[in-house]
Amino acid sequence: MSDTYDVLIIGAGPGGYVAAIRAAQLGFKTAVVDREHLGGICLNWGCIPTKALLRSAEIYHYMQHAKDYGLTADNVGFDVSAIVKRSRGVSGRLNGGVGMLLKKNKVDVIWGEAAIEAAPKGNEAGRVVVRETKRAEAPKGAKAAGTYQAKHIVVATGARPRAIPGIEPDRRQIWTYYEAMVPDKMPKSLLVMGSGAIGIEFASFYRTMGAEVTVVELLPQILPVEDHEIAAHARKRFEKQGIKILTGAKVTKVTKGDSVTATVETEGGKTQEITAEILISAVGVVGNIENLGLEKLGVTIERGIVATDGLGRTSVPGIYAIGDVAGPPMLAHKAEHEGVICVETIKGLHAHPMDKGKIPGCTYCQPQIASVGLTEAKAREQGFDVRVGRFPFAGNGKAIALGEPDGLVKTIFDRKTGQLLGAHMVGAEVTELIQGYVVAMTLETTEEELMHTVFPHPTLSEMMHESVLDAYGRVIHA
Amino acid sequence: MPINVLMPALSPTMEKGNLAKWLKKEGDTVKSGDVLAEIETDKATMEVEAVDEGVLAKIVVPEGTADVPVNDLIALIAEEGEDPKSVQAGGNGQDKTAKAETPPAGMAEGEKPRAPAGNETPGGGTMSYERVDTAPEGARPAGGTAAGRQEGGRLFASPLARRIAKQEGLDLAAVQGSGPHGRIIERDVRAALEGGAARPAQPAAKEAPAAKPDQPQAPQPPAPKPAAAAAPPSGLTAKQVMGMFEPGSYEEVPLDGMRKTIAKRLVESKQTVPHFYLSLDVELDALLSLREQVNAGATKDKDGKPAFKLSVNDFVIKALALALQRVPAANSVWAEDRILRFRHSDVGVAVAIDGGLFTPVIRKAEQKTLSTISAEMKDLAARARTKKLKPDEYQGGTTAVSNLGMFGIKSFGAVINPPHGTILAVGAGEARVVAKNGAPAVVQAMTVTLSCDHRVVDGALGAELLAAFKGLIESPMGMLV
């Protein structure tokens, strides 16, 4: 029997390892268990490596358009394996970084598949059984499989790609993000099922690299969670780039031969067949709630999500859940924040449940999309009398200088109180801009403080100012 | 030169205190010795006296401000001949400063502050006043501070919170902030507006009897937004709570007036009344046999219906009423700065009705016979169920009886129903094995728990009341005479 931990976290993804570090900071004896990689999907198979791929695509795109900037770049080409290698290298480096951070904070890493055998009860610690895993080699210094005791157990096991029956990923012709991230050659044609962040980012990457790309979305709008105006703007840009987009369309059947042929049913019951070399299934993710012993312990699970009270506490005292397993939005930054709130709650610090209405979302396609808060439609639906501000990239000096004159910054205010209800952007670098609005919303600023804020010139951020001014009929450059 | 009034130190170690209340308004003339304001620390409440004459020109720190550092400027007094409207804080406190008469308080816990003005306190200094018997009602500012008084001190509030407060006419100084470092955020303002809309500024009790804050009753018409009433520390907002559940997994039940009143009153009670609980087992054998005899002897009308049928609860009401007469100090309620002690025993009785409860009051229960109490209870309970009680039938009383015995509840602690000083929670009567003269014996017994407002009823006093109650129940003949 090993030592008793104050906090044991299952899963070393962005939620888990951040929670572990925070727990260690608070003086808890902390361990984190993982079966495959420190940093989780985000760092190894998600957010980070895709950003590396997209960066390659972006530079490739610029090189192809070097002439626009007065430059010459002949015979521009690429090496798929080198692009993938760079992407893997980025993940590898950060993965090592997480290991270092955990070590620095004296967090034990335990390697293997964990299951909770007994929940903590009163003064009695809970028990977590960690079985050996063949998935990946343990990092240096990690503790081996065995039974561990902990007073508080945090489930942070993340999520995995959702599979649609009949269209199960096969790693060869039907890919998930795993395979899409490490192609050994550029497919000539690609069908992307699902137009959320993951689907659109791969569509954007592969299109830039020259593939024929078709996106099929079940809902009437691509990027379904985004504001309709932003999504419409993005769609126009994608189509201009040559991406074919079918919305309100459903893949009903897939036949595999030399290539993949998908039967797509569109509105009105019409069907068409689309043939592509590869199909990427990007229809969302589902929480990893299995084989953890949760059901046996009586932890309430609702629609595939571990039910929590907003502070990470589940229905069973001593067992907590954060990140993707604790429900949407399934985003790394939400998981990190929840991890901190959860551990601070365990410590007895005054933590407030996260305001899920103020979690920003970013999609790193070309053009980028970033948003926070309510869309215009949602705001109206909730009964707000809204004021909407818009500012186009075409009115911004820096955007023109960058050669990025396409894009839009949209802001939504409550007419009565001046509360910033939502902000939505599409265009160059908007993912780096959105935090300004997130800070503003978190501090509960009204339009007045935003108007009084001095935005530096010349920057893209000036558009954020102008959009606010526009909502109040005071826009300058449009 | 205006006179600076500084935050006084109530004890040598005091570093900061709360400005509880201004007893003078801006523009009021003050004389030396007038009480300007009340300051409270965790130990005591003291009054700040003026030592100079003049006109209270400006209140710098609004009432309800917590943690005001000692020697901070709290108000300005314009001297004779000065225009109160144009006074400014003079210098850095080096000039004339109204030293509030504030000796070290140093009161030991539990010591009762009963010293009248000017008396020597244990600390050795002169205490100008203490809270019991304070300034006459008329001296109090009506309502409280007006909005916008906070220019003097910095008040941390989000821009959105400020805007909503301004739009709704809410004084932010009275709002408790829940953001980082006590910053007032939207949620706090919304909670204050919601909590405040149903709660008129404090002096309601002095107005019409219909507005008496006591038992759960029909909701009062929304009063003007309270300026002074600090927002009650609220729980999670509806949005926050709903955010924790899957939409569609619950149905929303709108609150009716009774539910709102119950929620408000009982939260208020639990937050402002220092409860403690005393439990006692009471044997019922004598009472049950007496009850049987009495009920059997009831005259019957021509249909064979007995004139009365006493319940155990009727005995409980009567016993509590008589016990209060025997322990008169417990027949009291707390009234802000004084205690009201009653001559008669007015006993409330909690009646559960569909969707809530009422607590009708049996007046002068000590004088009534058991059969009268029984008949009155039947009538009150029946009309409570149809919500036909008149307000004066459920207002007042010094105590109440809450009986969950019929549900088999063994014992419980009830929440005091303001303004009551106590409430008696009655459990189920049941056969129990007890030791009698060293041998086990089976008796009928029940457990009663008295919740006491410690401001009025101390532990020993509560115990005395319960002992008297027990004596009456166990020797019930005493209740018949």
Image (cartoon, rainbow, N blue to C red):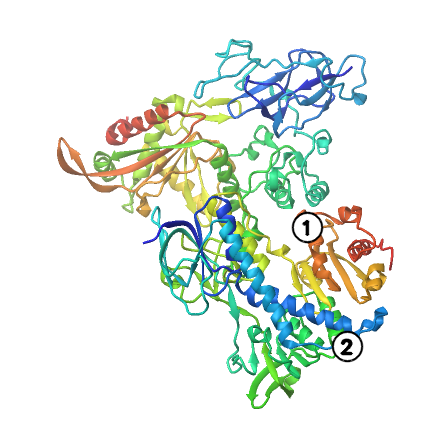
A2 left or right, relative to A322: left
State the residue position of label 1.
A439
Give the alpha-carbon distance from disc 1 to disc 2, as whole Å.
34 Å
Residue B141 position in % (x across, y down)? 66, 25
The disc, 1 or 2, on the residue closer to the chain's N-terminal end is 2
Q: Amino acid at mark 2?
A: Lys
Residue B329 position in % (x across, y down)? 40, 21
Q: Which mark is residue B373?
A: none
Looking at this view, is A228 or B478 the one in front? A228
Specify the quadrant of the image occupied by residue A458: bottom right
Q: Which mark is residue A240?
A: 2
Q: Amino acid at mark 1?
A: Val
Judge whether B55 appears above or below A163 on screen: above
Element type at mark 1? helix
Element type at mark 2? helix
Crowd tier of the residue under label 2, counting other residues whose Cα lies within 10 Å: few below 14, some 14–19, many 20 or above:
few
Residue A175 position in % (x across, y down)? 56, 78
Q: How many marks?
A: 2
Instruction: Indicate the quadrant containing the N terminus of chain B: top left, top right, bottom left or bottom right.
Output: top right
* Residue drawn at 15 percent across, 33 percent down: B436
* Residue drawn at 75 percent across, 53 percent down: A415
* Residue drawn at 72 percent across, 29 percent down: B152
Instruction: Indicate the quadrant containing the C terminus of chain B: top left, top right, bottom left or bottom right.
Output: top left
